[in-house]
Structures are given as structure tokens and as C-alpha cells.
Amino acid sequence: MGGLYGLVVILLWTVSVRGQDVGSVISKSMFEDFLKHRNDDICPAKGFYTYEAFIDAAKSFGAFGTSGDPDTQKREVAAFFAQTSHETTGGGPSLPDGPYAWGYCFKEEQNPTDYCVADPEWPCVPNKNYHGRGPIQISYNYNYGPAGKAIDYDLLGNPDLVASDPTVSFKTALWFWMTPQSLKPSSHDVITGVWKPSEADSAAGRVPGYGVVTNIINGIECGKGSNSGGEGRIGFYKRYCSILGISPGENLDCYNQKPFGA
């Protein structure tokens, strides 16, 4: 009986792990606490970003928030929401609960410009604008094209879908998060410890930690010493790690890192 019992326990554990999704890491109440002011009247994205849309989108990226030990899973969720909250923030130090409670206030870039560049694989569609939209503020035709292909939507032809369908919006952010970009590793591989720095990375100061994620998302903030952009990303991250009950880890900034490709 002991052998059979042990086999049953193993099978049940396997089923449990395989059936796990990010909803076991971040509950709806935590999501609401993360983004507590996103539905305030002053936020243009009021009513757009929902927990249900996030969970639905995450089902297309099964490794997100489910890789590694429990602390690693939580750290990835905190890092993702920290970076995307900074990209969409509507807060300031004088607003209720401080600046790091105001993520996801915007769903489109303010004062957008034309982000169409020549690209034979992902050519711009006439009269379409590829400015920043969604949690990661995805921009440029060369991102809209492959993101759309990955999630099975024509985002080159209909980029506005990223600002009108919340599930699609989250999917584009998760696609960017999970996918290596040119010379850059994926943010997912960095925050889960899969990425190991090469000799060139080490020489450029790129060491494992949240700082490299910032370097991936917006490397122009890196290698310039302390700056408001980096401080904001770290501020969100520390707040979310605190809500999830984990430490943020080491190497949180990219102040002394060269951008990828530099």
C-alpha cells in the first residue's frame, strides 16, 4: 500500500504543477492592491485593465509566473508589473498612496509620434500609427508585426486593437516579456535565472538581477548613473515584492551597465 500511496501522491503533485497558472501566484485582491488607482477618474485607462483579462492572456504564456521556486515565480510577477506600471504610470509623489500605486493609468502613449520605419518583413500599413499601446507600451511596426503573429492577430493592420481589447493588450506585453529581442535575452529568462552573462555582458556590467530587465525594456536609461526612470522602475518593483512577501534580490539598477548592443 505504501508504494501505491506514494505513486498516487506523485501523480497528484504532477497534475497540480502542470495545471498551475499565474493565478496561484497573484490573486485578484493582490492585483487590485498593485494597481489600486488605475480605475480612478483621472486615469484614461479607467475600466480597461482587468484581472480577468490578465489571467486570460497569461494562459497563452504558460511559463510566465510558473517557472522556478515560489519566490522566483513571485519575483517575475513583481518585475513584470513593475516595468509595465512604470510604462503606464499616472502618479506623482503628491497623489494618494504615493507614485508607486498609480500603475496602469494609461493604455496609450501621450503625445504619440509616427513609429513607422522601413522593414521589409513587417511593412507599415498606410494610415496606421504604431505608437506605444498597452502595458508594455509596444511600439514600432517591427514589434507590432511579430507580436500579432505570435498571438494570432493582425496588429500591423489593426494596431488599435492593443488599446481596445484588454486581453490582446496584456498578450502583447507578455509576448515582449517572454521573447528574446535581437541581442537581448528575454526578461523572463533574466528574472528566472536562466540567463547567464557572457564575457561581453560581464565587461559591460550586466549582471543577473532586475537591473538587466530594465536594460532590456529601456536601455537608454542605463549606464548614466542614478536617474528618475530607473528609480521609478525600482520603486514599483520593491512595492510589489513587499505585497508578495518576498525580497527583491540583488542588482536592482542598471546605472553602471552599458545598454545591449552598445
Image (tube, rainbow, N blue to C red):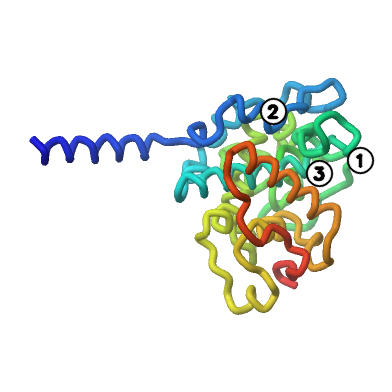
Distance from Cα at disc 2 to Cα at disc 1: 21 Å
Considering only vertical position in the picture, is 159 above or below 255?
above
- In the rendered view, does 152 fall on the left or right side of 254? left
Q: In the rendered image, which quarter is residue 40 located in?
A: top right
Q: Where is residue 38 in the image (x, y as percent from the top left)?
A: 76, 28
* Amino acid at pointer 1: Asn
Residue 149 visible, this angle: no
Which residue is disc 3 drawn over?
Answer: 131
**Residue 204 picture location, percent across and down:** 70, 75
182 or 157: nearer the viewer:
182
Which one is in front in this view, the residue at disc 2 or the one at disc 1? 2
Task: Say which element carries label 3.
Answer: loop
Q: Is residue 254 visible?
A: yes
Q: What element carries label 2?
A: loop
Residue type, numbered disc 2: Tyr
Label 2 Cα crowd, 10 Å radius (few <14 / some 14-19 / many 20+): many
- Quadrant position of the N terminus in the picture: top left
User: How many residues crowd around disc 3 within 10 Å: few (fewer than 14), some, or many (20 or more)?
Assistant: many
| Residue, disc 1 | 111
Where residue 171 sits in the image (x, y, percent)?
61, 38
